[in-house]
Structure formats: C-alpha cells, structure tokens
Image: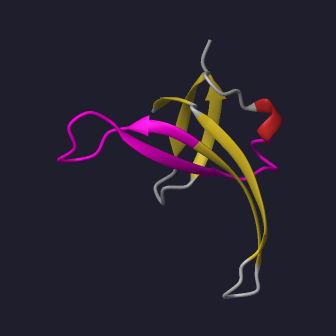
Amino acid sequence: MKIKVYGKVHREGTNKKTGKPYDFNQIHYLGKAPDVEGQTAETLFLDPRDFPLDKINVGQEYNVEFNQRGFVVGFEPLK
C-alpha cells in the first residue's frame, strides 16, 4: 500500500495502567475508510529497531506491507 507521511513522532515510556514499557514510532498519513467522503487521518505504529525515526522523512511516499495479522513487515521509501 502506498502512503505519504504527513507526521512522525517517537513515543517511549511506561503504561500507567499496566506498568509495562512501550517504545514505538508513530507515523501519520491520509487514508480511506468506508462511508467517509474524502480521506481520513490514519496512524501507523512502527518498531523503532526495524524502522528508525531518523530514516523516515515527512512528505515522502512509502510502500507499506502488512502480514496476515495486520503487523507492518515492510516500510520502504518510493523513489
């Protein structure tokens, strides 16, 4: 799936309810949804070990691949 990155942020900390640590990169892009005219704001969560934030450029297009469980297995820049 082709997306264009409109925003990015790194999130790291401890969940207040569970006490478990979290560490992820959050990517914002525009997408489609049923019954929506136009586009929706979408968020994608990436493992920072596999997809470092400094390698992701706002304004650039990327090809995203998901496995059968919906997890990101590919995130490559388009040229």
Q: Residue at x 79, y 31 (%)?
A: 55
For the C terminus, the image quarter is top right
Residue 56 x %, y %: 72, 32
Task: Left or right? Give the position of 8 relative to 28.
Answer: right
Instruction: State yes or no: residue 49 in magenta.
Output: yes
Residue 67 x %, y %: 51, 51
Q: Residue at x 21, y 47 (%)?
A: 34
Q: Residue at x 66, y 27 (%)?
A: 58
User: Residue 30, located in which quarter of the rendered image?
Assistant: top left
For the residue pair 79 and 58, the one nearer the viewer reads as: 58
Q: Residue at x 72, y 79 (%)?
A: 15
User: Residue 27, located in which quarter of the rendered image?
Assistant: top right
Height in image: 40 above or below 47?
above
Residue 41 x %, y %: 43, 43
For the residue pair 56 and 65, the one nearer the viewer reads as: 56
Q: Which residues are magenta?
A: 28-52
